[in-house]
Image (cartoon, helix red, strand yellow):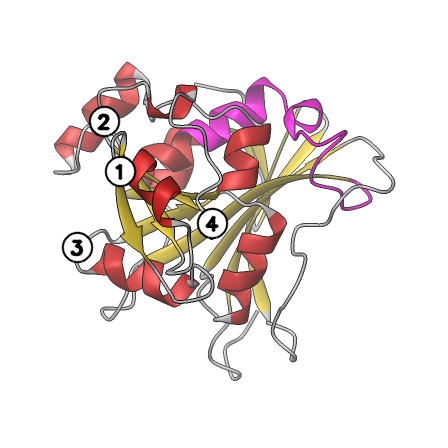
Amino acid sequence: MVAMQQVWPRFIPVVDHLEVYEQAPRPHSSDRPWVVLCMVTSVDGSVSVQGRSAPLGGPVDWAVLTALRGCADAIVVGAGTARSEDYGPPSVAPEVRERRLARGQEVVPLLAVVSGRGELDPAARLFAGPEQVRLYLAGTAPASRRDSLAQVADVRTAGDRAAEAAAIVADLAAENRSLILLEGGPRLNAAFAAADLIDELCITRSPLLAPGGPGMIEGAAPQAGCSLHLERLLVADGMTFARYLRRRDPHESA
């Protein structure tokens, strides 16, 4: 167990990070999966330093990400993030694997990578594991790339000119995947936000300044702001770990 304190809504000196995220309230909608956005940011809001998020994170942030991945039925990430962060095959820790099996989930969550034009290397480490990775491409992706990637992944079309968030969620819903973990990057986050498909945000704030870096959401976004409710705030190693829920009922209390 990673040593974390809860400071909101009430103080708890030590919490189990796995139980916190597994048992978190999720007022699930029956018509589509619950979507969790997980990101780490600097104090000034940057999500990467020189193109990578690793300098912002640390052991506790990684433990939180591991806990969230352990809850997920599918991990969705943009191709740019998968490349820059050198994503490997999906995996879970032994203790998380046991919890997943007890809940009736697959041993590891599905990893789904979103790439409009299919700009991924079939020889990348991403495709080296025993579990097949899924790729969501746009209908305009070159046929040569599509055919090449189909040798190493489950390639699907999720929109005509761009891979669309709603089409991705609908495809995963058809497989009864009830919890999707969205891991960025900023443009993919914007697509999900613009479609109002983000239900929960788990945001790690690192005690660093990283001026000039990209923000959490870059590109098209809802014209009206989305109201959020701070459900829980944890602290550890100088970092804060906030869990927000999308407030969809305008009369809902904070």
Residues shaded magenta: 43-66
Residue 222 point in image, percent of width and height: 60, 74
Residue pointed to by mark 1? 150
Mark 2 Cα-neighbour bin, 10 Å: few <14, some 14–19, many ≥20? some
Which part of the image, by quadrant, shows the N terminus?
A: top left
Nearer to us of marks 3 and 4 is 4
- Between the C-alphas of marks 1 and 3, the distance is 23 Å
| Residue at the image position 34 percent from the left and 44 percent from the top | 146
Give the side of residue 140 with respect to residue 11, left or right. Answer: left
Give the side of residue 203 with respect to residue 90, left or right. Answer: right
| Number of the label disc, if any, that sits on residue 131 | 2
Decide: is 111 above or below 222: above
Mark 4 Cα-neighbour bin, 10 Å: few <14, some 14–19, many ≥20? many
Residue pointed to by mark 4? 117
- Between the C-alphas of marks 1 and 4, the distance is 13 Å
Local secondary structure at mark 1: loop
Local secondary structure at mark 3: loop
Decide: is 168 above or below 55: below
- Of the residues shown, which amino acid type is indicated by label 2? Glu
Decide: is 76 above or below 206: below
| Residue at the image position 17 percent from the left and 60 percent from the top | 174
Residue pointed to by mark 3? 176
